[in-house]
Image (cartoon, rainbow, N blue to C red):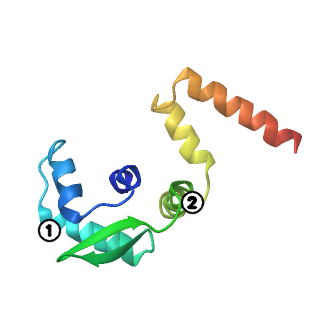
Amino acid sequence: MKIVWRMETATVREVYEELLTRRKIAYTTVMTVMKTLEQKGHLKSSHKDRAYIYAPARPQEQVIRGMVGDFLDRVFNGAARPLLVHLLQDHRLSEKDIQEIRVLLKKETKR
């Protein structure tokens, strides 16, 4: 998704070639994932010159919000607190991240 969001439109080949610069991956795997993302409504496709061109179906923030919600439901039974605790204990949050979260919590508390 990040590649398609950045490129705005992309073919399977373009996404595959970009991913190959990072790690070895099969073309068919990229094609399958993109078809799955289309079926889930994250991508839309059009046909041009024997190739499907994919574009984001929804804004990045909306898709991420949905994916995070799905992840929370599957892994943490819908609760965000265990995820935050895990991130803190695993040292995944920088001091800057923690400060930003504090500011957001203060704003949310005032509501």
Question: Which of disc 1 and disc 2 is earlier in sequence?
Answer: 1
What x and y, as percent, mark residue 94?
Answer: 51, 24
Is 7 positioned to the left or the right of 21 in the image?
right
Residue 37, compared with residue 69, is above or below; it is: below
Residue visible at 22% across and 64% down in the picture: 12
Q: Which residue, given by chain and number where applicable, does mark 2 sit on? A: 62
Q: SS of the residue at dot 1?
A: helix
Residue visible at 61% across and 50% down in the picture: 80
What x and y, as percent, mark residue 43?
Answer: 40, 69
Is 108 positioned to the left or the right of 18 in the image?
right
Which residue is most to the front? 49
Q: Amino acid at mark 1?
A: Thr
**Alpha-carbon distance for marks 2 and 1?**
27 Å
Dividing the image into 4 quarters, which one contains the C terminus?
A: top right
Query: Which label is found at residue 58?
Result: none
Q: SS of the residue at dot 2?
A: helix
Mark 2 neighbour class, 10 Å CA radius: few under 14, some 14 to 19, many 20 or more: few
What x and y, as percent, mark residue 2?
Answer: 38, 51
Quarter-of-image position of residue 21: top left
Q: Decide: marks 2, 1 in contact (CB < 8 A)? A: no
Residue visible at 57% across and 46% down in the picture: 82
Residue 6, compared with residue 66, is above or below; it is: above
Dividing the image into 4 quarters, which one contains the N terminus?
A: bottom left
Is 33 positioned to the left or the right of 88 in the image?
left
Q: Amino acid at mark 2?
A: Gln
What x and y, as percent, mark residue 92?
Answer: 46, 32
Residue visible at 18% across and 65% down in the picture: 29
Residue 12, compared with residue 64, is above or below; it is: below
Quarter-of-image position of residue 108: top right
Q: Which residue, given by chain and number where applicable, does mark 1 sit on? A: 28
Which residue is most to the top? 95
